[in-house]
Amino acid sequence: MPKVQFATFYLGDDLYGINILQVREVIQDFHVSQVPQTPAPILGLMNLRGQIVTVVHLGRNLGIQVVEPQNTCIILKTNDELAQVHASRSWIFPAGEDSVGLVVDEMGEVVEVDEEEIDASPANSSDRDSATIAGVARLDKELLTILHIDSILQLDFLSRAG
Amino acid sequence: MSDLDLELVEEFVVESRELLEAAESDLLALDLSQGAPGQEVVNRIFRAVHSVKGAAGFFGLEVIGVLAHRLESVLMKVRDGQLAPTSQMVDVLLQANDRLRGLLEDIQASNGEDVSAHLAALDPFLGEGGSPPAPPAPPAPAVTAPAPQGQGGGSFAGWSVPAALAAEIKRHGRHLFGLTVDPSRDLIGQGRTAAALIEDVSDLGELLHSTYDEATPGGSFALVVSTVLDLDFAVEGFALPRDAIQDLLRASVVAPAPPAAPPPLPKAAPAAAPPNASAVAASPAAAKASPAAAKASSDGGSGAQVETKSTVSDTIRIKTTVLNALMEMAGELVLARNRLLRTLADKTDQIEGLGPVLSQVSSITTEVQEQIMRTRLQPVGTLFGRFNRVVRDLTHKLGKEVNLETVGADVELDRTILEGLADPLTHLLRNSLDHGIEMPEERVAAGKVRFGTIQISAQHEGGMVNITIKDDGGGIDVQRILLKAMERGLLTEEQADRMSDREGLQLIFLPGFSTAKVVTDVSGRGVGMDVVRTNIEKLGGNVDLASTHGVGTTVTLKLPLTLAIVSSLIVTAGGQHFALPQVGLQEVIRIVPGQGHEAIEEVRGASVLRHRGTLLPIVRLDEVLDIAPTFVDPQTGARRSDRRQRIADRRQSSKPRTLEEKKLAEQRAPGDRRESLASVQRILVLKVGKNRFGLLVDQIVDNEEIVVKPVSRFVRSAPCFSGATILGDGTISMILDPLGISTHAKLRFDLTKDKAVARPKGAQGPQGEIFSLILLSNHTDETFALPLTQVGRIEKIRRDEIRRIGDREYLSYRETTLPLVRLEQHLRVKAPATEPVEYFVVIPNLRGQQIGLLTTQVLDAVEVKLQVHQGSVPSRGIFGSAVLDDRIVLLLDIVQLAQLSSADGEVRPLLEGITPPLRVVLVEASPTTRLIQRTALQRAGALVTVAEDVEAATALLKRGGVDALILDGELPNQPAEVLLSDLRADESLARLPVILTTSHLPEDEEDSVGRFAARAAKLDIERLVERLITFAEERR
């Protein structure tokens, strides 16, 4: 059975993951310029070596209580960059054309998961949660929630965040 | 194959490789966007494969052609929506694409390769009946068969087309052309590739067949094309000489079947070579048409290569991605330069030699950026060219007779702007054709010529490009617009009555407004002018409309030369920084606390400012953006509770910035013209379309050239911004969009009258120090300034356009000869170190002697607060010097410069001959204007006494002996009209000539101040003097 590598990170008490092929880089200690008139989870814009990155407050977007300030940001690959990836495309959920960074509490390890070990989002999760959960991997010690980046970054999803 | 052929094939391989590489990423994007592919992506892949297919046909690369054709067929179905892309399908497409790329690697052997597996894999997507026949495949001559018979002129005179196909084409009113392409003349000579030619042809018609004949010297291509264009347009559209295009329907070459000629398999062609080649070589016409090719055959090729290359050596092909990358890097360079200058600004005294190096780095950066920017410029002619087609098609459809004239096709604009301009311009043109130009009979009945004329023209004006579309049609009936607006409930009858014609016309820009009597499929659905306006404003431009009922309509678009780098003010509101492009910025008004309450008033909660005789609606930037105002009290702060969370974040993250600001403020403290933090507010007067509003900001931090960066979809939805930029200090700032702000603030301009308030009661905003200047330089450390009001036009010319007669220089300009003036000839300033290839000619709007100022650099057009340099002494040709951003700026006396450069070079007072000299009292609030006007009037020969204020002036006047008063019409809190009537109350001054000067002078108000009084625009010295002369003559 094929295995998939996930980059994991913590938000609040729980462990979340995204396919490592989607991660461009992880940066610490960054400065964000706010942008008025944007949905609450949009923290603002970051200058990443001359490129403008939209920074998303993942906790606020998913309704997870986090301890501020967070100083870790995962920069996702854009569709163009993803197109360079010639591996299997399973468990990849494109972030779109724009450069996006997700702010998280801290990074976890990279874990390799057998696709068989991944379940669908629990039947009893809320509508909003089930849209964001692509699957749940059963790791030895804990559960890894694999995020459906595509849905999370939809504009209407962002604008409905509390 | 000859060297030339090899070169072409090589080019084909390189180009195809690029195309297919791009197609691959697009195919991958197609995979990611499954189910709902972007039409653009599909089109791009389709075109890439199509070009490869077409060019492969040229070179007899059958296998590549067949595979590309099959691939194209599948893509066509995707494009037309008959097929939705699936992962599996994309896989197959990618494999076929890979295979094509593989074939390109060994092009010579490609015809021996087997691609049947790939063809079979593609077939299932084509559904029943498999694939359509593949034209480039060798057996295809059943469709068309050009037969090279060499009957002279080097053309394929023996075209043969099946009668059924020809009849079909004829029945559809299309033309069928045989094209003979001479590679050295039609491809290399024009700097295009075989694929580009195929693209040109496919754009304008349907390519039925293409072959390559390597037998003729240098080789030649034969193409069969069906198109709607007639011969004249085909010559233009395909960019081929007329004798290379043969009308196959007219020429009786339509044969029932091709056997008359041997099927021209490219491989078989050499067999027919000897007679064909000799026939061509013997033909003088052919030798003349392609000397390089003829030489190639006699010289053995290698020498010819050098020659053909030399003809194209001044242009090369560069991928746009490279240009865009360069462009972006130039932008970064500008930002880095700004940062460098800022960091080292206060170190120049400490480090010897730093200053000059910095300014050199600075000017080189500007130069690099300008040059790179120029690579993005394209002549508007490329856009105008396609309108011929639009006009031709539409006039036929509508039964009208219209002439299209284009002027200024060589004016250049940024590619992005040109692209964005295509739709709005087409729309305007359609409007003119459909609604503007009347039917021929109507025109004759109205006493006009049958032929309507539409003129599209482009010209430079003040750093912008004006594009006008002018028709001599029926014009717009304002009454009908008003009626329509009332019908739609957009306007009450009372409002309509009050509206002027000009205001009525503006209604046309309201969404959903169309006055077409009949909705045609050409236009008239009411999705018109508002979209045009929005699109143009998105490009940073604006639209103006003028129309006279029965006479015609003129639409003027004003556009920036480029979008990429924009001169902007950096402003703050609620502690955040924003960039405001200077394009729509008209002026800056300072609000000083204490006086602030006097200036801004409220009408039922709406803030307004009395300004130039109208009420200016005031929008608070922090309010419209819904960010907390921080100017009240930064410690406790009056903030909205629902945003507290975010504001807390913000304060935390922006702390260093605040410190930096404090430091900056301290540095600037004494004698700085920039105000300290938070004590002063600024109102930026912005123009949106025809309307103006004031944007209230906390402070203006800086003036920066910013590089516009696109923003993500998350931020794009924010209505008040047009993009983002990275400032010199590395932080990101959003770029404000005046149109978006006015819309978001719900300003209802459409119903406001231009002059809502009868009369200002005084209390105009404090101003008068603000100057619109154009800054010039000769790439030396001297900067020259000219008030923008004195600049008529700025032209960019090449050095070789300057004509010399004796020791004088001239420019042929608009059918006149303009004497050129170099500043270093008349002023004690440095000459440019080198002779540049291009100059800027500044043409002032002088009434008398016309001149052109020759400079090498136009630095900027700026709205500035000018500080006249203490101890500045006027000298010949200049009024004095001022300090601007720490550099010394020389204020040019354009009138005197014109005299200095006249035939005899003598400076004559403008008031020459008027004796005794006129005694003039001058009252002027702005020190700079005062300096310029006083000096200029003295130079004109008047005796000028400057009075501090009106009281002092009145005292002087009462003593008598004064010939005229020149009175600042914009004195703070002292409306000119009131002053004038007070003055007239004194009998001795009742007949005193008075000239009221204002910074902005509408033409129609020039003479509206009664007898013994006149108006003139400030700094318009010639007009001032003219008025004085009139008064002096009246006295005698």
Image (cartoon, coloured by chain):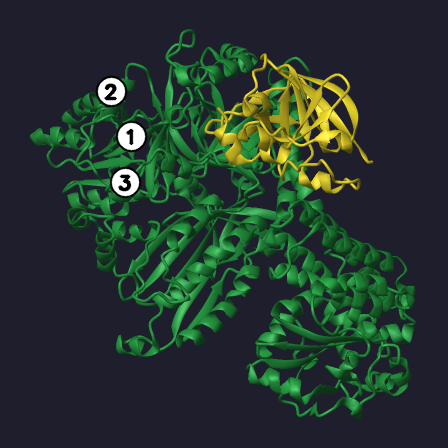
Element class at badge 2: helix
Q: Residue at x 85, y 85 (%)?
A: B276
Q: Are marks 3 and 2 on the same chain?
A: yes
Chain A is shown in which shade?
yellow
Image quarter hosting the N terminus of chain B: bottom right
Q: Is residue B52 above or below residue B979?
A: below
Answer with left or right where residue B709 lies relative to residue B254: left
Q: Badge 1 local density, few (<14 within 10 Å), some, or many (20+)?
A: many
Quadrant where the C terminus of chain B is found in the figure: top left
Q: How far across and down, in percent of the image, does residue B866 sit?
A: 42, 26
Give me the chain letter of mark 2.
Answer: B
Q: How many marks?
A: 3
Q: Chain drawn green, letter? A: B
Chain of the residue under label 1: B
What amino acid is found at the position of numbered circle 2 in the picture?
Glu
Where disc 3 sits, the SS reads strand
Q: Nearest to the eye among marks 2 and 1: give it.
A: 2
Whether residue B981 sits left or right of residue A73 in the image: it is left
Q: Which mark is residue B1016?
A: 3
Element type at marker 1?
strand
Q: Position of residue B328 (x, y in %)?
A: 65, 38
Q: Amino acid at mark 1?
A: Val
Residue drawn 80% across and 88% down? B149
Q: Image height check: is B346 above or below B892?
A: above
Name the residue tied to disc 1: B944
Earlier in the chain: of badge 3 and badge 1, it is 1
- The answer to whether the residue labelled 3 contacts the one labelled 2, judged by CB atoms less than 8 Å apart, is no
Q: Which amino acid, by three-letter code, is at mark 3?
A: Ala
Image position, residue B488 (x, y; %): 25, 52
Residue B466 vs A64, above or below: the answer is below
Tag of residue B598: 2
